[in-house]
Image (spheres, grey):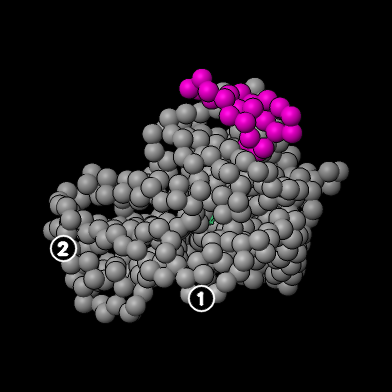
Amino acid sequence: MSDNHDYDLIVIGAGSGGVRLARMSAQRGARVAVIESRYLGGTCVNVGCVPKKLFVYGSHMGEDIEDAAGYGWSVPADQMRFDWPTLVANKNTEIERLNGIYRRLLENAGVTIIEGTASFTDSNTLAVGDASYTAKHITVATGSWPVTPDVPGKECILSSNEMFYLPQLPRQAVVWGGGYIAVEFAGILAGLGVETTLLYRGDMFLRGFDDDIRRFTASELPKKGVKLRFGVTIEAVRSEGAGYAVQLSDGTEMATGLVMAATGRRALVDGLGLEELGVQLNAGGHVVVDQHFQTAVPSITALGDVIGTPQLTPVALAQAMVLSRRLFGDGEGVMDYTCIATAVFCQPNIGTVGLTEAEARESHGKLRIYRSEFKPMKHTLSGRDERSLMKLIVEDSTDRVLGAHMVGPDAGEIVQGLAVAMKAGATKAHFDSTLGIHPTSAEEFVTMREPVAE
Ligand code: FAD
């Protein structure tokens, strides 16, 4: 595989996609380097999925302790303590452990790790500081970065990146945004006792999710202390006393101790010099690639968040495996983006796979809709007013299950298995003939008999 380049492959970015691509390619015998400017493991490990989930666990503990009373456990309210710096420090220790694991994974596979910020000199050469490196193939796996709208006082507004290192928790917080990151952080803050308001300019958050799921989640979150204000946006923020005054589009003002924006992410291509080489960016700023992750420049490929496909770690990992096989293996496979199961780790969780009802109505004609709403068994004794929702969308003519959606504890864990069944083409008759696991919430997915709508 040797030629006159320093490497067969250089990957820019040691995030979810980059590490997987570098490792798989090195294991196939390629000479590989990965250049990373910030942290091994990228967004997911450092300021994304992993620390977020640890915070979600942490924020749920208070509720678990309260719920324990119905089961005979007593923890006097005046003895309940939560220490934010402990949670952050323990999270940081875990992240450092994972950074070490990523380093060892790469080193053991024979990948050279180059620390620094890469930019293209030509289509086969990258500069990192004063050094330069050449490769036959270069993959851009530089991920994405939070975008905060340009409002006066923008410098007072935190992104998810800073939230992971907050020195102390405020008494009140405003979370701005209607996507899953906003909803998850609102849940984390509220669970930890912060008076939290989520502001969203549209009339219902979680765009792209099934409408029943969105409405149901909107009815559950206030029970957990998240105040929802839709149809309103932030026009300006200014420091006031120890906190901030937030000026809203409806003419009102809010006082708060923290403002976080989760209003979108953009492809991180700053300073790479891609367009000068002829690599195209689309209107949204994402790197344009074909289905083989090929840009317009033959030596340059790209994958992960930077190409604007669903911004999820398993998507970046799967893309990396497809690309590694094409560059150094035996296949020209393409990614299958159908039935990607996802979870929103709000409280209660959302788990979803396949089409929403609106999408299915548009593409599949006559449907059968099955829906079940109930109180999870755990809360019969805890007394907590929390409900779960499950929904199946079935194509009437073929009986195929097109979508499965859930709001409730462990929804992410439950929906993963349904994704396998749906990938395999499961019909409603398969669901009906599957015996439930009793007593669980999950069994509801195989016991919904009567459609509630067609
Ligand atoms: P990244 O993981 O972002 O890696 C890109 C790397 O490139 C970074 O390490 C960056 O420092 C480096 N880099 C950038 N430019 C350069 C340069 N010029 N030179 C050298 N290095 C460079 N996904 C899920 O599946 N589940 C979740 O629960 C989930 N939760 C999330 C929560 C939050 C708050 C956020 C922000 C994201 C979450 N995601 C989640 C999304 C997930 O983290 C991303 O989809 C995934 O990390 C994308 O991987 P990637 O390889 O494309 O990019």
Quadrant that contains the N terminus:
bottom right
Residue 109, label in figure: none
How busy is the neighbourhood of tag 1: few (under 14 within 10 Å), some, or many (20 plus)?
few
Provide residue 246's location: percent of width, then percent of height: 60, 28
Q: Residue at x 65, y 43 (%)?
A: 171
Q: Is 44 included in the stretch rendered in magenta?
A: no
Asked whether 16 or 238 is in front, the reply is 238
Task: Say which quarter of the image contains residue 64.
Answer: bottom right
Name the mark nearer the viewer: 2 or 1: 1
Q: Residue at x 32, y 70 (%)?
A: 421
Farthest residue to the top: give it: 251
Task: Say which quarter of the image contains residue 385.
Answer: bottom left
Asked whether 189 or 293 is in front, the reply is 189
Provide residue 442's location: percent of width, then percent of height: 35, 70
Q: Is 251 included in the stretch rendered in magenta?
A: yes
**Residue 89 left/right relative to 381:** right
**Residue 298 left/right relative to 444:** right
How busy is the neighbourhood of tag 2: few (under 14 within 10 Å), some, or many (20 plus)?
few
Provide residue 166's location: percent of width, then percent of height: 72, 47
Residue 103 in sight in this render: no
- SS under mark 1: loop
Residue 450, label in figure: 2
The prevailing secondary structure element of the residues shown in magenta is strand
**Residue 291 left/right relative to 216:** right
Q: Residue at x 29, y 68 (%)?
A: 445
- SS under mark 2: loop
Q: Amino acid at mark 2?
A: Glu
Provide residue 355's location: percent of width, then percent of height: 31, 53
Q: What is the spatial separation of the Cα atoms under label 2 and label 1, in whole angstroms?
A: 38 Å
Give the magenta-colored segment's residue range: 236-260
Report which residue position mark 1 lands on.
Answer: 72
